[in-house]
Image (spheres, rainbow, N blue to C red):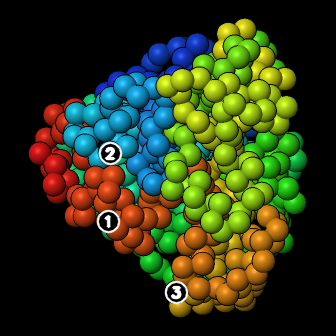
Amino acid sequence: MKHILTKLFRSVLPLWGLGGVLLFSSCEDFLDTRPEATTDAAGMDYAKAENIFLPVSAAYAMMRNNNAHGFAYIGLFEIAGDDADKGSGAGDNPPMQEIDNFSYSSVNDLINNIWLGCYDMVSVANHAIHEMPKFEAALLSAENRQYARECQGEAKVLRAYAYFNLVRLFGRVYIADTIYQADELANLPQRSAQEIYDFIEKDLQEAIAVLPQDYGKEWAGRINRYTALALKAKVHLYQSEWDSVAACAGKVIASGRYDLMSNYRDVFRSKGENSEESLFEIQSSTLGRSVGEATYLEYAFYQGPRGNSPTNMQGWGFCVPSQPLIDFLNTRGDTKRAEVILMKAGETYEGSPIKLVDGNPLYYNGKVFSPPSENTWTYNGYGFGYNVRVLRYADVLLMYAEALVRGGIDPQSAATAAEALNAVRDRVDLSPLAATLDNILDERRAELALEEDRFFDLVRSGRAPTVLGSKGFTAGKNEVYPIPSKQLQLNTKMTQNAGYN
C-alpha cells in the first residue's frame, strides 16, 4: 500500500499543528499552507466518493512528520532505555545525550519536538473525523456512506495512537477532540492520565464497531478492525487491565488473519512491509524515485552506519545497541535475533561492508538495515523507504501471554500463555519455556529490541528504577518527561510534572 497511500498524500490539504508551529517535514514540498480545517478556493466536494479518503490520507501523511516518528521518537522511546546508547560521535547532539543519561529538563528541544509531532497528528486526525459526517450527509449510496464511517474510524485510531504516545510520554496532557482556534487551544485544561486513557479507549471502541476486517491486498497497510484491537490491547496493557488485554489480543489471534513470518530477518526488510505479521506500520516511500517529493521518513537514516561508504550506505549512527543488550542476547543464546539486530562495524552485513571508523560506534541497529539497491535518492538516502514497525503480531502474542500469566481471562480461549510465548521463540529456534512473567518480559525485550518498547515496558512493570538507575533514572520523576516549557508558556492552565522545575 505504501505507493498508493504516498501518492494520495500529495493531494491532501494541510492543517495547522496544535503546538503553534507548522511542521510538515515529509510533506512540506507539496502542501500549501492554510489555517486548520480549511480548503482551497474550490472547496471540497462532499458528494464525490473519491474524495472521502483524502482527509484520512492527510492524517496518515502527518505520521511521517519528523517530529512524530523521527529523531526525537528514537530518543525518547528507545535511547532512554537500557537497550540503546545515543551513538554517533561522543559530543554529537547534547539534547540527545541528555535523554540518554536522564539529565534533560523542560527546555530540551527533542521533548518539545515530539510534543508538537504528536499534537500535529491529533490535529489532522481531528480534521478527518470532522469531515466524515459531511460526506455521509451528501452521499446518496449507502455503501459510500458506510465507507465514510469506516474512514472516520480510521482517523479515530490514528488520534488514539497519538494520544497513547502522549500519555506514555507526559502523563497529563490536554484533550483536543475537535477543531480549535489558537486562543481556544491555549485554554484547554490538563487532564489526568486516566482521563486520557478513557478518551483513547472510547476512540478505539468506536472505531472497532465500524472498521472492516481488512481492505484487501491493494490497500495492505491500512488500519483495520484488528489494528484497533491490537492497539486497544496495548492501551489496556499499560493500565494493567489484564482481562481486557487478553480479550482484545485473543480476538486478533482467534481471527487467524495474522501469523509470524518464518524468517525473523525478513520482518525488517522490504519483503516484510505490510506482511502477515504487520498490524500497524508508518508508511514511508521514495515512490521509486531518486528526486522529487519528500514522501519518506528519515527514521532509518538517523540510525544508519556513520561514516560508511558508498554515500548511500550511511546515516547518522544514532540509537545503537548497548552492551547490556548485546550481553543479554548472547547469554540466552539468541543467535538468530542477534544476527539481525547487531550490525557490527568492520564486518560485512548482508553483503555490504560496514566500516570501522575511530570515534564511531562499534555496533548499529541492524533492524533498519537498508541495502544499496533500495537507497536510490540522488543524495544520501539511506533507509528513506523504511516503514516504521509500530505493532507486530509477535507483540500481540506476547501481550496475550503476559495478560494470562497476570490473571487475565480470554473469552475466546485463543491459546494458552505457553503456546503464545513459545510460538515467538520457535520462530528463532529457541527451545520452549514455561510461561512465567520473567520469561515473557525477557522475550519481549529480545523480540522487540530497538523497536521503541523497552523503556516504557520497564516503566509500566515498575522495573525502571532498578534497571535504569545507573543511567540516572530517578523514581517518581523520570517515569514521564517534563511538559515542554514552551508549551507551558502557550497554555498557562497546564502545570509541570513532578520533579521538574
Real-space CA distance between mark 2 and mark 1, rounded to the nearest whole angstrom: 13 Å
Query: Based on the displayed image, in which of its 4 quarters is residue 311 positioned?
Result: top right
Marking on residue 261: none
- Establish if 230 lies above or below 288: below
The disc labelled 2 sits on which kind of residue?
A: Asn
Q: Residues within 10 Å of mark 2 (few under 14, many from 20)?
A: some
Q: Which mark is residue 406?
A: 3
Q: Could you tell whether 501 is left or right of 338 in the image?
A: left
Q: What element carries label 3?
A: loop
At horizontal 77% and vertical 57% (from top left) the residue drawn is 336
Q: Mark 1 belongs to which amino acid?
A: Pro
Mark 1 Cα shell of 10 Å, populated few (<14), some (14-19), many (≥20): some
Residue 332 image point, x, y percent: 66, 68
Tell me the residue that label 1 is attached to.
465
Residue named by callout 2: 101
Between the C-alphas of marks 3 and 2, the distance is 32 Å
Q: Which of 298 and 62 is in front in this view?
A: 298
The Cα atoms of the two marked residues, 3 and 1, are separated by 21 Å
Please tell me which residue is depicted at 59% across the width and 23% down the height of the picture. 357
Q: Is mark 2 on a helix, strand or loop?
A: helix
Numbered circles on residues, count: 3
331 or 460: nearer the viewer: 331
